[in-house]
Image: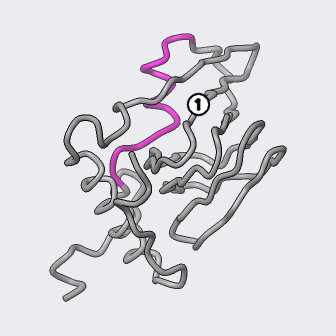
Amino acid sequence: MSNDLIELPPANLPAPVARQKIMAIQMACQALPDGQRMDESPPLKHWLAPGIYAREIHLPANTVVVGKIHRHRHFNIISKGSITCYTEFGLETHTAPASFISEVGTKRVVHTHEDAIWTTIHPNPTDETDIGKLEEMFTALEYYELGMEVYKHEELA
């Protein structure tokens, strides 16, 4: 989706408020008409090796994408491009090559400055091969699944 349609919230909000803002941005993105939003799932490559599952996503320049909520701490690699992310922890910018750790419960609003390739790496001790099961193991749809608080819109007024 074009980045001119989304304004990132301030970086110093309390975590439950920031989470609410992130979910509101996701809903705004999903409500955009065809042609103004990115497909539900940008191109993904799934990599399986003994004990490891990696997800590689290719993101076009000048778009905004809202990621999933991560259930576990994991490793990230930006191998191409430059991005700015908004999370409950604030703003972070990464320019390839870059590596960093995501914390439990992290959900990002990502603005790409250039075409980007981002890979997340997760332990897969059971060597699961079903991608749907792997996504359920490593991501959540709502913060409450992880016991994390989110302020409702009415609570912010």
Q: Position of residue 141 (x, y in %)?
A: 35, 44
Q: Nearer the viewer, residue 150 or 38?
A: 38
Residue 126 position in % (x across, y down): 63, 18
> 10 Å neighbourhood of mark 1: few (<14), some, or many (≥20)?
some
Q: Residue at x 69, y 30 (%)?
A: 123
- Residue found at the far top of this picture: 129
- Decide whether residue 14 is among the magenta residues: no
Q: Amino acid at mark 1?
A: Ile
Magenta region, residue range: 129-142
Q: Position of residue 77 (x, y in %)?
A: 75, 40
Q: Is residue 141 magenta?
A: yes
Quarter of the image where the C terminus is located: bottom left
* Picture quarter with the N terminus: top left
Number of dots carrying numbers: 1
Establish if 129 lies above or below 19. above
Residue occupying the point 48% across, 81% down: 10
